Image (cartoon, grey):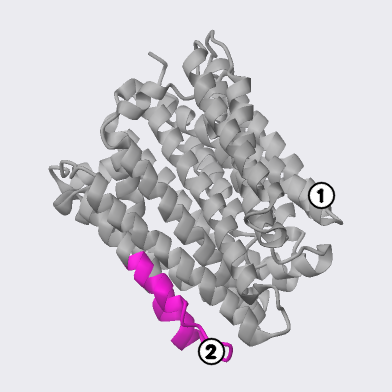
Amino acid sequence: MNAVSPRRWQALIVLAAAQFMVIMDTSIIGVALPDMQADLGFSPGGLQWVFNAYVVAFGGLLLLGGRLSDLFGARKVFTTGWIILIAGSVVAAAAGTAWVEILGRAVQGVGGALIAPAAMTLLMMLFGHDQRELGKAMALYGAAAPAGGTAGVFLGGVITEYLSWPWVFIVYVPIGLATLAAVPALLPAVAGRRGSLDLLGAAAVTAGIALAVFAIVRAPEQGWSSAATVLELAGAVALLVAFLLIQRSVREPLMPLAIWRTPGLATANLAMALLGAAWIPMWYFLNLYLQQVLGYGAFASGAALLPMTVAIMIFMIAITARLLGRFGAKPLITGGLLILAAGVAGLSLVRPDGAFAADVLPASLVAAVGMSLAYIPAMMSAMSGARPEDSGLASGIVNTTYQVGSALGLAVMTAIATSSGADRLGDLPRLTGGFQAAFIGAGTVAAAGAVLTVLLMRRPKPATTETDARQEAVRA
């Protein structure tokens, strides 16, 4: 057994900061998107790749990041991830064209995919000796995620308004360098172990996801029945099928297929995919509505989204675990997705001459409550049936599913919005109509997730006490 580190709580600050930054990277660019579109010449459909490039790389490589952490040691992979994230941030900040910006975001995603699983391994090593300490550490580490999402929205607005959009990436450089300086003294050196690396499987799954998103983004211009779209989608399916075949044939796969026999794993992952496919497009188009229709600046837009993100943090930490202990996961997932669908449906009523207090605030708070109720129970349901030795793999799969669902959902809703007028920047009624169509699509996805959860998910056993529920929630 490893010796207990006397500086483990200081180390936790470094690990929580990593979680904070990785999650913030998905939200900080939101309010900067219109300025980036104007400066770099993004098309309305191409703009989503500023978000999707990060998510596809992050989600597609999470399983590989976990495997690399096992083979080469978590501290080495954690350090390497930060170096890559800093490099991607520099590229994204210095970008003068759209394709360079997308490249920088993809490199950031690669760094995040190495940081996240390595940080979890290090946390378990530092606090695994004491279940009470582990629970406290998990709570603090888990709270860093909603805090990062909240800070990203607001900080992105402040930076974009008073500096310029490249600074939303430059901010990662000093934080990353400070983290790297603290690693040798605070984080334990973790020995790797013998084993093989499934690079072919990693390449197949990441390429399949990216090609599927690319095909859906281009479909409104190419035509859904065009030869190009059909071939691209067929290629994506072929790559994903090849990934599954590779997992069956290699000795040490990234994702052993036997894991899918875990009770509840498949249904919970389906719920997580649909949750991401509804939530991320809602957040993306709501930000564009605030800036492009209501005329908010970057700072005002970030401030307008704060009530929603603060509500998520409060509900996740203070309320969801309490309800989970009383009712179990299935009712919360179902109810959360239905409430999210209702909130997004309310946003579909936004007007060209609308107002924040009437058109945005009430519906966005309803959607935030739905997201808060569904996310942690779905995560726990995906992991609860896994064997202890498979818990890391189950966690990686459900996180990957959420990220992939987010990317594909955003691609589909962008295609719907563009075909409904979201590319008419000077025509507020048409522009608003495109955003309304995207909100209707996202709400439909959330409602479908609720129905499928009712039909497919076996009711999990409720946690015996509120304390148990909180411990399981932060562990998830």
Q: Nearer the viewer, residue 423 or 338?
A: 423
Q: Nearer the viewer, residue 298 or 218?
A: 218
- The residue range painted magenta reads 339-365
Q: Residue at 27% of width from left, 35% of height from top? A: 384
Q: Of helix, strand and loop, which mostly describes the magenta segment?
A: helix
Q: In this rendering, would 423 be left or right of 240? A: right
377 lies above or below 163: above
- Which of the 4 image quadrants contains residue 171? bottom right
Q: Assess disc 1: are there few (<14), some (14-19) or many (≥20) residues with their C-alpha within 10 Å of its C-alpha.
A: some
| Label whose residue precedes the other's in the sequence (2 or 1) | 1
Q: Nearer the viewer, residue 205 or 289?
A: 205
The magenta stretch spans residue 353: yes
Instruction: Give the amino acid at mark 1.
Output: Val
Residue hosting label 1: 100
465 lies above or below 300: above
Q: Residue at 38% of width from left, 60% of height from top? A: 446
Q: Position of residue 142 (x, y in %)?
A: 41, 46
> What is the spatial separation of the Cα atoms under label 2 and label 1, in whole angstroms?
36 Å
Q: Nearer the viewer, residue 333 or 154?
A: 333
